[in-house]
Image (cartoon, rainbow, N blue to C red):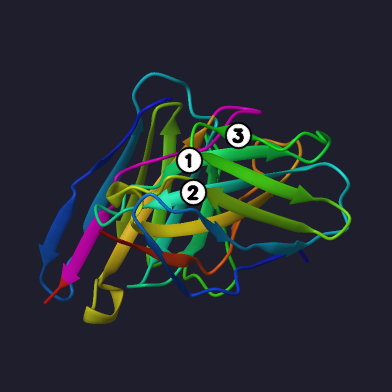
Amino acid sequence: AQTVTQSQPEMSVQEAETVTLSCTYDTSESDYYLFWYKQPPSRQMILVIRQEAYKQQNATENRFSVNFQKAAKSFSLKISDSQLGDAAMYFCAYRPYGGATNKLIFGTGTLLAVQP
Amino acid sequence: GAVVSQHPSWVICKSGTSVKIECRSLDFQATTMFWYRQFPKQSLMLMATSNEGSKATYEQGVEKDKFLINHASLTLSTLTVTSAHPEDSSFYICSAREVNTEAFFGQGTRLTVV
């Protein structure tokens, strides 16, 4: 069975600094997707970034980038130039490739605080 | 991204009554919808997966007679919590996706049973 592990329940970063959130996963599949979702206090789930496993290049979205290490089954999120609005719960998620009903498997989340 | 609207945002109901939560995909056809439950400071727990026009598939441990899911059209799925009790109080979130696309989330519903 696939699992997603986030070993950091809470993290803190100073405004304008960089922070890295860790995520590891376990799967026997070769094709899959990995995601980072942000859940601010409003509790609306927001997709931050997505990575296809077959792509070697790490995904980047503005200040957000990932370090995808397929062999190590590691998928960390780096937030550069942290802003107060980045404070939220961050969930790492995995989904197998293909199939309309393939479900997301979430990690337990990392609560990120941004200090002014 | 696509928009998923969930209604109501919050609801209070009396113990023993039923409450219905709606999840609508506003600008796309959702072949699959997912219903989650989230306790405070915890992750999302998948309750069930529904495909348009067919019965929902429930996760292990989720009572299908208590949490009725209907996905009658490509833009609407409903979750009905029947005979609600205080332990059913929680935050419920839906997500919807077309085939081979991202899943988009509704804004969630906070249910309080008194």
Q: CA distance from mark 2 to mark 3?
A: 14 Å
Instruction: Indicate the secondary structure of the residue bearing disc 2.
Output: strand
Judged from the image, the secondary structure of the residue bearing numbered disc 3 is strand
Q: Which residues are magenta?
A: B98-112
- Which residue shows up at 60% across the image and 69% down it? A6
Residue neighbourhood size for the residue with mark 2, other residues' Cα within 10 Å, grouped as few (<14), some (14–19), many (≥20): many
Please state which amino acid type lies under the numbered disc 2: Tyr
| Residue A37: assigned label | 2
Q: Is residue A21 above or below residue B32?
A: below
- How far apart are labels 3 and 1 at the CA level? 13 Å
Q: Are marks 2 and 3 on the same chain?
A: yes
Q: Is residue A35 above or below residue A87?
A: above
Give the residue pinned by disc 3: A60
Position in image of residue B19 (x %, y %): 21, 58
The chain to which mark 1 is attached is A
Q: Which residue is mark 1?
A: A47
Given the image, on which type of amino acid does mark 1 rest? Leu
Residue at image coords 39%, 47%:
A45
Name the image quarter holding residue A26: bottom right
